[in-house]
């Protein structure tokens, strides 16, 4: 598995370290590895929403496990990004219940609006659009995930508004 | 109004906060349990209630609890399965988002019954804001003395934490969930040993669905017998149904088991009837994994009896003419929906979510997806339909975990009940080019073309 | 404990798996095992090739088990009755599993160094279908270099996890594992690191297919043109007991000694495997025996052939005899005795 090299500045701030320590404290002292998934989320959020191999190595060091144990996990779960993604990542649910309520149309609209194909990021690094599998919001379709939050009952107008808000910096991505 | 057990207080302003929850009778079951009941007495009440697992399998909760290994002397754990990922299901999220303390109360009471001193709620990573809601609620519960050392001055101590996944349907399978909680890939374990003997960190562990655990406070407060009188027969209690698809009012509803499917879809209290008054075409009553029902088997069983919202009635007729209550992911399709496209959509989901550990699932789900995609895009053959049938039967029952079955069943049911639609796709590829092909020309209006 | 497999009864210790019990009986009833490896803890259950029908659970609970069970991971119970090749359901499932394992396999046996000693070839031979039903494009992976000694061909991999367990249990720091998931799960180091631990070469021996092969042997010879000898040397790291694969006087490959289920008897170190290819390094014990059906036997230890009268065939046989002599070592010449094996 060749990982293309992208540069990432690694910075484990004292606040981040404190949060990591808190998460590790949720598990028995000899089971630090259990904190891997929550810690990866925190570390990724603090590093432009992606994880370089170097950053994963750092996580391995923090949890006292081998780097391959982190790589195996990161590549298994869909929420960890192994290369840079847009600051605002629109993740459209495309599974049946959303599909029959116009999810594909919504994603196509967002793609057209932003000038990208599904899976791509705008050249300025602001937006990515991806199609994902069921997000558990079937009754509120069509919908997408943006950061820690869901944007539901989407319409073209709502997507316009969300893009505007993102550009204006009015969208909160993470609930800290 | 029908009986409500879980959502009876959902409309009280501020019920999300600890204070309001407590003022409205919250945490009473913890008090009652710790002060006046032994752990075994609680297990007996839960057994007597007839409560069945609400995650999909419907296994009796009390019985599952009684399997936990208490003899080994190892620490025991209760893990709540909040990895709700079954397409069509979003009830647990609703519960946790709006009344998080109900789950926490249930976790404390249930942990006490199991003798667990360290318990976890495993929530899917996409529900990150709900993860934060639960984290805060747990902090409130610690501050109020419901968690931690010597709860209510007793010698019972409990630590409860919330753990998040990171995008993997398979982690809803209990042993994959445990692996994931241990910081590993979500590969299901080979059973036996079952978690009740060797689960989290090889300790005896019980894994229960959010809704199952949220029922426990009511059972402890009101007795198992009282619970068993709600609902219908072996389908005791209420059930949260996540309703979606072509209905007027999608959302989460708490029903008393035993109402008819007709009432659930058409009454204003629940789904409010069909969207745009278009005719109903198909129903998936229990999440994407369960067999799809064609129109003539939705409101009536094959015997002509009313189809009821119960475990038994929904599975009446087996897979030939029935389905399953499953997780309560209730997806309604009208005549604009294409069953082939929908089956492909699910196949894509399962292929995407297969962990890749065992060969029939790893290779078979991808194969199903590819063939279905070919048929849906007008490149299929009649032999492909039989091949699909054969592949799904080769997957079913031969895999490590139920994901293989879950991927096979929707394909089998779609071919069983809607074979003509597959044939239509093969015979008239130019007519199905557009993905909305049935919107202007529902299948019922072109069906005659096949029998020429 | 008493267990009956395809009508053959055997007494085994509690805790024995159905597969191990079947191996004790031997013969046709032994289920094929593509992922299970008795010498590696935690293997098995994944490939589903060894599924069997448990027609009677035990004396105490005679109910049959509802699903086919992975025989490598199911313990026997007293009075258990198992159907392996006598169950049509089992044979059907084996066919299905074989097909699943082959649909995305490149079928590049003509250029694969594993050909001739490949478990997937054997499985396909015994349980494969004549017809191919997979019309789609096969899955492929980008090549990854994992170092000087081991060649990784991910396209051939069946994800048995044996090499991962080998690295976990034999080496001190595992650097490779399974990355990705579903049908894109793959053996990888993720960062293209070299796998160079002293015992990493055993990954080649445990690999049931041609996904991990010996780079120092790459394209040197078809395995059936080599003549295997048991050999040993004084090794400070491992037992030094190996099989050396000869072509005349040349050692072309060194492997661990494998039993009839293709499992190594003792793991060996990389130094023995990769760095000692001189006959002077080894004490040659004698020809290594293989089970009759093995393709490796075809040029080496087949039973003595019947006399044939046709002239052309006689010449062929003479030629074969000459070949056998040619690929044998001078010190241990080919004898008539060997052909009785």
Image: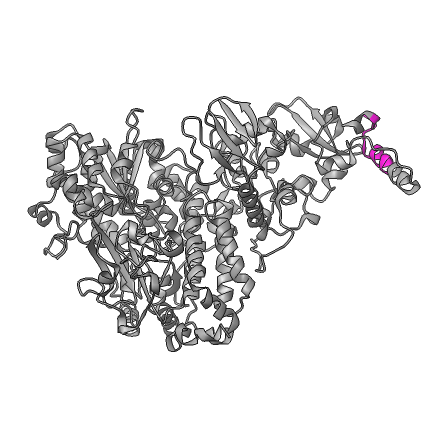
Look at 34% across and 39% down and name the residue there. Answer: A34
Look at 42% across and 68% down and name the residue there. Answer: A123
Q: Nearer the viewer, residue C195 or B50?
A: B50
Tell me the quadrant of the picture where the N terminus of chain B can be found.
bottom left
In the image, residue C324 lies in the stretch drawn in magenta: yes
B415 over C282 or under it: above or below: below
Q: Quadrant of residue C147?
A: top right
B267 sits left or right of A162 in the view: left
C11 over B388 or under it: above or below: above
Q: Nearer the viewer, residue C76 or B252?
A: C76
Q: Nearer the viewer, residue C35 or C21?
A: C21
Number of disc labels: 0
Q: Position of residue B217 (x, y in %)?
A: 16, 42
Look at 44% across and 50% down and name the residue there. Answer: B354
Q: Position of residue A45 (x, y in %)?
A: 32, 53
Q: Quadrant of residue C334?
A: top right
C79 over B131 or under it: above or below: above
Residue extending furthest left?
B23
Residue extending furthest bottom?
B440
Residue extending furthest front?
B303
* Image coloring type: one colour
Q: Is residue B398 visible?
A: yes
Q: Nearer the viewer, residue C59 or B127?
A: C59
Q: Is residue A3 visible?
A: no
In the image, residue B57 lies in the stretch drawn in magenta: no
Q: Position of residue B314 (x, y in %)?
A: 31, 54
Query: Which segment is the magenta one?
Result: C320-336
B99 sits left or right of C62 in the view: left
Q: Position of residue B415 (x, y in %)?
A: 45, 60
């Amino acid at each position: 598995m060749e990982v293309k090299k992208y540069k990432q500045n690694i910075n484990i701030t004292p606040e981040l370290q404190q949060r990591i320590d808190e998460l590790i404290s949720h598990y028995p002292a000899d089971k630090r590895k259990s904190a891997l998934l929550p810690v990866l989320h925190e570390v990724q959020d603090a590093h432009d929403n992606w994880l370089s191999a170097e950053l994963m190595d750092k996580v391995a060091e923090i949890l006292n496990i081998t780097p391959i144990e982190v790589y195996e996990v990161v590549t298994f779960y869909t929420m960890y990004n192994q290369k840079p993604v847009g600051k605002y990542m629109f993740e459209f649910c495309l599974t049946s219940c959303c599909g029959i309520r116009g999810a594909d149309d919504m994603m196509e609209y967002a793609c057209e609006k932003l000038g990208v194909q599904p899976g791509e990021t705008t050249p300025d690094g602001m937006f990515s659009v991806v199609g994902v599998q069921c997000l558990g919001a079937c009754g509120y379709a069509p919908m997408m995930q943006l950061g820690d939050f869901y944007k539901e009952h989407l319409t073209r107008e709502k997507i316009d508004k969300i893009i505007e808000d993102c550009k204006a910096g009015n969208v909160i991505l993470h609930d800290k | 109004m029908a009986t409500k057990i879980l959502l009876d207080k959902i409309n009280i302003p501020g019920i999300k906060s600890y204070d309001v929850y407590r003022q409205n009778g919250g945490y009473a079951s913890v008090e009652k349990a710790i002060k006046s009941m032994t752990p075994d007495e609680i297990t007996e009440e839960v057994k007597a209630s007839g409560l069945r697992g609400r995650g999909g399998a419907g296994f009796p909760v009390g019985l599952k609890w009684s399997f936990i290994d208490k003899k080994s002397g190892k620490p025991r754990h209760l893990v709540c399965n909040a990895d709700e990922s079954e397409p069509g299901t979003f009830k647990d999220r609703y519960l946790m988002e709006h009344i998080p303390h109900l789950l926490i109360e249930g976790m404390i009471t249930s942990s006490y019954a199991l003798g667990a001193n360290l318990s976890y709620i495993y929530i899917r990573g996409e529900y990150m804001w709900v993860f934060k809601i639960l984290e805060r609620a747990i902090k409130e519960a610690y501050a109020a003395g419901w968690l931690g050392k010597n709860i209510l001055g007793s010698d019972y101590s409990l630590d409860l934490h919330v753990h998040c996944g990171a995008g993997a349907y398979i982690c809803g399978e209990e042993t994959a969930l445990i692996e994931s909680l241990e910081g590993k890939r979500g590969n299901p374990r080979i059973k036996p040993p079952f978690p009740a003997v060797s689960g989290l960190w090889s300790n005896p562990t019980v894994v229960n669905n959010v809704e199952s655990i949220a029922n426990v406070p009511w059972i402890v407060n009101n007795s198992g017998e009282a619970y068993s009188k709600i609902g219908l027969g072996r389908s005791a209690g209420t059930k949260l149904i996540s309703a979606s698809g072509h209905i007027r009012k999608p959302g989460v509803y708490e029903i008393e088991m035993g109402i008819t499917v007709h009432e659930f879809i058409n009454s204003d209290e629940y789904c409010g009837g069909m969207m745009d008054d278009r005719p109903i075409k198909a129903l998936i009553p229990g999440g994407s994994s369960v067999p799809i029902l064609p129109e003539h088997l939705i409101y009536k069983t094959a015997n002509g009896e009313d189809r009821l919202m119960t475990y038994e009635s929904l599975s009446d007729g087996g897979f030939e003419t029935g389905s399953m209550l499953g997780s309560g992911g209730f997806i309604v399709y009208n005549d604009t929906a294409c069953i082939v496209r929908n089956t492909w959509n699910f196949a894509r989901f399962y292929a995407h979510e297969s962990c890749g550990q065992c060969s029939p699932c790893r290779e078979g789900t991808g194969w199903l997806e590819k063939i279905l995609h070919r048929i849906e895009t007008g490149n299929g053959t009649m032999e492909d339909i039989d091949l699909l049938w054969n592949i799904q039967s080769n997957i079913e029952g031969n895999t490590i975990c139920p994901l293989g079955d879950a991927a096979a069943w929707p394909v089998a049911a779609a071919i069983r009940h809607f074979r003509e639609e597959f044939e239509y796709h093969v015979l008239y590829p130019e007519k199905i080019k557009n993905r909305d092909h049935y919107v202007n020309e529902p299948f019922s209006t072109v069906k005659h073309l096949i029998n020429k | 404990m008493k267990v009956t497999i395809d009508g053959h009864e055997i007494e085994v210790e509690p805790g024995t798996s159905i597969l191990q019990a079947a191996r004790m009986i031997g013969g046709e009833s032994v289920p094929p095992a593509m992922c299970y490896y008795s010498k590696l803890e935690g293997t098995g259950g994944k490939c589903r090739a060894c599924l069997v029908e448990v027609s009677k659970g035990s004396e105490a609970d005679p109910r049959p088990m509802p699903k086919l069970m992975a025989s490598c991971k199911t313990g026997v119970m007293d009075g258990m009755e198992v159907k392996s090749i006598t169950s049509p359901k089992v044979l059907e499932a084996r066919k299905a599993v074989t097909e699943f394992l082959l649909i995305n396999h490149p079928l590049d046996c003509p250029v694969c160094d594993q050909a001739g000693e490949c478990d997937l070839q054997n499985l396909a031979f015994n349980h494969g279908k004549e017809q191919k039903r997979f019309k789609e494009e096969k899955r492929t992976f980008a090549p990854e270099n994992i170092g000087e000694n081991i060649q990784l061909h991910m396209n051939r991999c069946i994800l048995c996890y044996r090499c991962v367990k080998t690295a976990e249990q034999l080496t001190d720091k595992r650097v490779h594992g399974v990355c990705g998931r579903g049908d894109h799960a793959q053996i990888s180091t993720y960062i293209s690191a070299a796998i160079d631990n002293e015992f990493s070469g055993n990954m080649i021996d445990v690999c049931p297919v041609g996904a991990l092969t010996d780079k120092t042997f790459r394209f040197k010879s078809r395995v059936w043109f080599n003549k295997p000898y048991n050999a040993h040397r004084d090794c400070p790291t491992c037992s030094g007991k190996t099989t050396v694969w000869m072509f005349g006087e040349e050692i072309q490959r060194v492997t661990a000694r494998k039993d009839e289920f293709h499992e190594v008897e003792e793991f060996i170190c990389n130094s023995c495997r990769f760095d000692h290819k001189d006959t002077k390094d080894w004490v040659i014990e004698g020809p290594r025996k293989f089970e009759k059906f093995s393709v490796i036997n075809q040029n080496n230890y087949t039973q003595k052939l019947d006399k044939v009268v046709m002239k052309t065939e006689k010449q062929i046989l003479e030629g074969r005899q000459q070949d056998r002599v040619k690929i044998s070592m001078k010190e241990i010449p080919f004898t008539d005795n060997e052909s009785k094996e």
